[in-house]
Image (cartoon, rainbow, N blue to C red):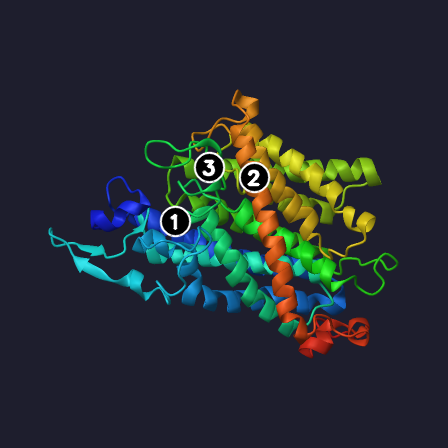
Amino acid sequence: MLLALPDEMFAPFGAGDGMLSAGDTAWVLTSAALVLFMTPGLAFFYGGLSRQKSVLNMMMMSFGSMGLVSVIYVLWGYSMSFSSTHTGESDIAGIFDNPFSLFGVSQLLETKELADGQTGYVLGGFGSVPAIVWVAFQLTFAVITVALISGSVAERMKFGTWMLFGGIWVTLVYFPLAHMVWGGGLLSGSEKGIAAKLFGVDDEGTANVPPIDFAGGTVVHINAGMAGLVLALLLGKRAGFGKTAFRPHNIPFVMLGAAILWFGWFGFNVGSEGAADMIAGQVWVNTTAATAAAMLSWLVVERIRDGHATSVGAASGVVAGLVAITPACGALTPVGSLILGAVAGVLSALAIGLKYKFGYDDSLDVVGVHLVAGLWGTIGIGFLAYSADGSPGLFYGGDFKQLVVQIVIALSAVIFTGIMTVIIAFIVKPLGWRVDREAEDTGIDETEHAETAYELA
């Protein structure tokens, strides 16, 4: 069933016919459920990679994110990210929207009777779906971004400090970055954005060369990866790092988690189209192609370097490919996606060893996978872009402009996240970051949660 919307309120979202689609709405709701399922999948992935005495704490960090961030997102998160696109208000310096404009999001449920007797939403929708459905979808992105960071601080961070950090970080870092990239802010294609300042605007006031981040290369993966690097450096190494072998305690958990992530990622990427159309099909194929290529290339690196291909390597390669294709999935051909994924698998497989070279304890390779593959996926668009979403990439006869924009946007996200995460880390420092050495030796599951994952006779 199609519902007409008042054209004057719907216009900011660019729907050509001003109609809501039941099919598109059903798909985005399904996608939201798929993305929410990714966070328990991440809990299995991280839990399996941890030691036996830390698995529950790692899973609780993901579940804690689901509870905390969901509440915050409903109250002020969506408003900080997207309220100006509904209300027409000016944002704050292109960085974030007014957190009180759509506080609680109930305003998005307001309707009025139209001239033809149908019902329209006062504040419009997103494309062909109601705005409240887009709230549901975007909420799940915020949840998993916070959860991703937890892999860098495994086995040594106090759970209470983690929860406070997560609440402050999602408010001061994630919501502003989401607005800057997707909500018409500084890192978007809007007239006031950096891209417009670099290469000008068209007759409609949008950047001639808009940044491309289809589903969250900057907002989710570069963001989480950089935050993970900062926390790993500030928190310090686990006891025994570099001397003790921190082996995954349950590799089937790791592979199950990777499988759930791959499954849920179709909601992540394909749902970001906001419609069930041909581009959604293109994104599905590109996501699969890049992920498969990354898994294979990671295994090749392992085989050449170590003499064997591992199950953990296969699972990690899957995640690296998913991360890399996230920003690019709507801008590449399937063959371009194969190339992007294959390079991502090689880069991430090599990058996870950097923590030993430089001496930082990124416990579960958030930096090596999410930051590195996220940067490559975002910048690689400048080489491999083919669709009309932006200028053609260098490999398809384009000039350097799209590559420059992608690099600038990626570096801007790195700098913003790095600075803000350091500030937040010092805000929560009085609570204490780390469990004490005895608790770390005993196991963080027992000391923080009074539980153990396995009761061994």
The amino acid beneath tag 2 is Val
**Residue picked out by circle 1:** 27
Asked if residue 123 shows in the view, the reply is: yes
The CA distance from mark 3 to mark 1 is: 36 Å
Q: Residue type at mark 3?
A: Lys
Residue at 64% x, 44% y is 320
Give SS at disc 3: helix
Q: Quadrant of the C terminus?
A: bottom right
Q: Is residue 23 left or right of residue 436?
A: left
Amino acid residing under circle 1: Trp
> Is disc 1 placed on a helix, strand or loop?
helix
Disc number at residue 408? 2
- Circle 3 sits on which residue? 197
Numbered disc total: 3
Displayed quadrant of residue 384: top right
Q: Position of residue 217 (x, y in %)?
A: 55, 45
First reached walking from the N terminus: tag 3 or tag 2? 3
Q: Nearer the viewer, mark 3 or mark 2?
A: 3
